[in-house]
Amino acid sequence: MMKAELQKAFNKQINEELYSAYLYTAMINYFELENLGGFASWVRAQTIEELAHTSKLIGYLHERGVDVKFGAIAKPTATWKNTLTAFEAIYKHECHISACINKLYGLALKLDDHAAAIFLTWFVNEQVEEEANASEIVQQLKLAKDTPGPMFMLNRELGARAIAFPAAPATE
Ligand code: OFO
């Protein structure tokens, strides 16, 4: 049986993932209204990925016989000064999520729940990718300096990101 303290921490992470999806949804709205369909498409894919993270955590709790407790999801920021500040916000948010995951992983180890810790290694690795992706786009936007040509290219490049709901099993 998973200890109550760890159950609570998993539930908190589910809320964090749902907030991530909510934040990226607000960004879809922002980029669509800025006529940056490619950027909107990238954050749409990200929204779906966050829901997949949520589903993966919920699936694992169910596997452990834990009842999921749902809390209120905070209102996300919905406007940004420009594309660069929006992506800087994404990078900062993903760093926050990495810190949350590391804390959860640390708690699983502290409570001697090695099965939960092993499950969470997927998320630890995923966050390396999440941070790297956001950071790369921030660097590209800094180089583009909001000039039409590079922004057009970047918008097209980001629009090519495939949207897929990963069907990975909870314990993968
Ligand atoms: Fe963006 O990785 Fe989950 O929250």
Image (tube, rainbow, N blue to C red):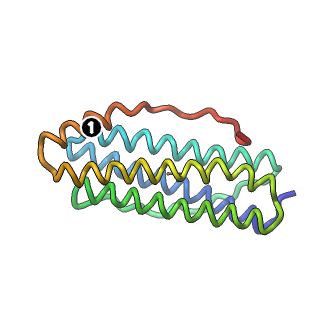
Q: Residue furthest right?
A: 1
Nearer to us in this view, 109 or 38: 109
Residue 76: horizontal and vertical position, in percent?
41, 61
Residue 141, placed above or below residue 168 = below
The answer to whether the residue bearing label 1 lies less than 8 angstroms from the nearest atom of ligand 1 is no
Image quadrant in which the N terminus is located: bottom right
Q: Nearer the viewer, residue 7 or 136?
A: 136
Q: Is residue 169 above or below residue 107?
A: above
Dot 1: what SS? helix
Q: Is residue 55 left or right of residue 160?
A: right
133 sits to left or right of 59: left
Residue at (30%, 42%) from the top-left corner? 39
In this image, 167 relative to 163: left or right?
A: right
Tell me how many marks there are.
1
Quick one: 74 or 83, which is closer to the camera?
Answer: 83
Report which quarter residue 112 is drawn in.
Answer: bottom right
Query: On the image, numbered disc 1 is attached to which residue?
Result: 37
Above/below status of 158 relative to 107 = above
Image height of 37 relative to 118, above or below: above
Which residue shows up at 61% across the image and 51% down it? 123
Locate residue 55, reporting x and y percent: 63, 44
Q: Quadrant of the C terminus?
A: top right
Residue 40 figure quarter: top left
Amino acid carrying mark 1 in the image: Gly
On the image, the x and y values in percent for residue 97 come to 53, 60
Number of residues whose C-alpha sits closer than 10 Å to that of mark 1, classed few (under 14), some (14–19) or many (20 or more): some
Q: Residue at x 34, y 31 (%)?
A: 160
Residue at image point 48% right, 61% down: 95
Residue 159: percent from left, percent from top: 32, 34
Q: Nearer the viewer, residue 149 or 54?
A: 149
